[in-house]
Image (cartoon, rainbow, N blue to C red):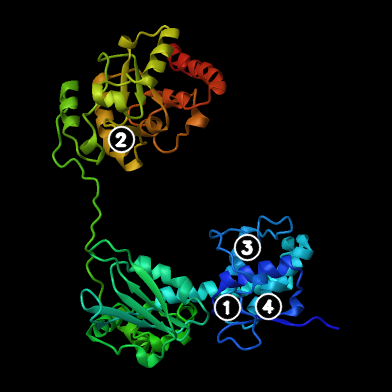
Amino acid sequence: MAPALRTLHLAADDDFAGFRSAARALLQGGVPPEQVHWSTGEATLFDAPLATPSLAREPDPPYGANPADARSPDALRLPAALLRTISHAALHDDAQRFALIYRLLWRLQQQPALRHDPLDADTLRLAHMAQAVRRDAHKMKAFVRFRPVAADDVADGTLHVAWFEPGHHVVGAVGPFFARRFTNMAWAILTPRGSLRWQPPGADGAPGRLHRGPPARRADAPPADAGEALWLTYYQHIFNPARLKLSMMEKEMPRRYWHNLPEAALIAPLAAAAQARSDAMVAQPASVPARTVRLLPARSVPQVIASLDDLRAATARCRECPIGEHATQAVCGEGPVGAPLMLVGEQPGDQEDLAGRPFVGPAGQWLDEALRQLGIARESVYLANAVKHFKFELRGKRRLHKTAGQREAMACRHWMEDEIRLVRPKALVALGATAARALLGDGVQVTRDRGRWLQRGEDGLPVLVTLHPSALLRMDRAAQDEAWQRWLADLSLATQGPPA
């Protein structure tokens, strides 16, 4: 004799907690899915209530917990991702959703390896149902439109009411979102699948409360008001005919929601007039742009730079690029006029900016040590930078070095040329890419031309190209020793002078 069919009645269409408790008891009792029938809505004489001893409800575990009873050695343990999929699929409109879920749970109990099969038919169907539920919940969050109505039982006398027609049983799941979003507003959402009403927190400190209610009818929703007319006017004015893509619009806002959206009535006439409006926009004359691009100003008044003191005074006032506005002071070169060798770096660093002297920071200490090993006195050479102000970006209270841009370096180039003219060195050493480009032009490459003497086109001065000492500081310790020795070899060529 075939075993009797057991019919179980759930309290509501979205009673996932009741289903979970019943499914747990059925699985532990070894009841196969073909002997179980699930029902919702109004109970009948043939439905088994969930309060029977064999199917007693247990307290709900925390969100994300395993729906099986962890105290039982035979409990079914589910991955968290699968549990979320099942909880979402339980809200689908399909009348057979609970039978499908229980059948999958039964199969997982009998075949644990099934959870690793992504192509299983039941698993795929549940995933599609869960995705449809999540999409429906998202649309409800996006397309609910509240309208104010007078209410005597609300503190400020206004209740905001909305009508929505969800495709699945998502009303209860979405309710907490609206409670968080409109915490201080009294509102109600009416749907054919149930209603929600939010009572905001009271002035006496009473917490807000979310109430579930019975299904509603479209006639229960309030009519349009003046605020809606204002919204429609705004929507009409922000409609851009040049970006009209009806297929994309219908994908994000399906047509089945349009009859409850006030702005949907404007879509058809606005779309019909889109081409004419686009043509009118194109025919309009070009407007004068309000935004202007600030160019680097040229030296409006030629300055007579007759000495290094004149140069220091002029660079201190320089604002031909934005760097000078933020630096502490200009940093010109240091050394004797007529020095046989002039070493040109990139720009002053943080310590140079504060001290007003070149090469006094960490990179300067490496340069001092290199000059000492090569037998060159710092006082006998002229040390300078291609850019005279410190460019940086703030990180908290720290000022981190930032490489000067090409336009900034070009704006500062005439100061460097004045410095070379006043010092009158016999040879130049370019320390790094910025200095090399300022002295020799864009064609020079440090990695290719380092350790070579090149010649300037302006005055014919020889230029030795090598790395900036800060490049050595940024290297790994394992590579620093070899790089140091090679850098010393480059600088030793400066002591020998350019080839005849």
Give the residue displayed 16% in from the left and 24% down from the top.
306
- Answer above or below: position of 56 versus 12: above
For badge 2, the amino acid type reads Lys
Which of the image's four quarters has the N terminus? bottom right
Q: Residue at x 49, y 24 (%)?
A: 452
Residue furthest out toward the right: 1
Q: Are the two marked residues, 3 and 4, in contact with CB atoms closer than 8 angstroms?
A: no
Considering only order in the chain, which callout, 4 or 2, is on the residue closer to the N terminus?
4
Q: Marks 3/1: CA distance?
A: 19 Å
Decide which of tag 1 and tag 2 comes sooner along the chain.
1
* Helix, strand or loop status at disc 3: loop
Disc on the earlier residue, 1 or 4: 1
Q: Quadrant of the C terminus?
A: top left
Q: Secondary structure at mark 1?
A: loop
Is the residue 99 above or below the residue 265 in the image?
Answer: above
Spatial distance from mark 1 to mark 4, Cα to Cα? 12 Å
Residue 74 placement: quadrant? bottom right
Q: Does residue 302 appear in this view?
A: yes
Quick one: SS at disc 4?
Answer: helix
Q: Are marks 2 and 4 in contact (CB under 8 Å)?
A: no
Q: Which residue is mark 3?
A: 67
Give the distance between the C-alpha atoms of the residues marked 3 and 4, in whole angstroms. Answer: 16 Å
| Residue at horizontal 35 percent and vertical 33 percent from the top | 400
Q: Residues within 10 Å of mark 4 (few under 14, many from 20)?
A: some
Residue receiving disc 1: 92
For mark 4, what is the residue?
A: 99
The quadrant where residue 86 appears: bottom right
The residue identified by callout 2 is 391
Residue 103, position in %: x, y? 72, 73
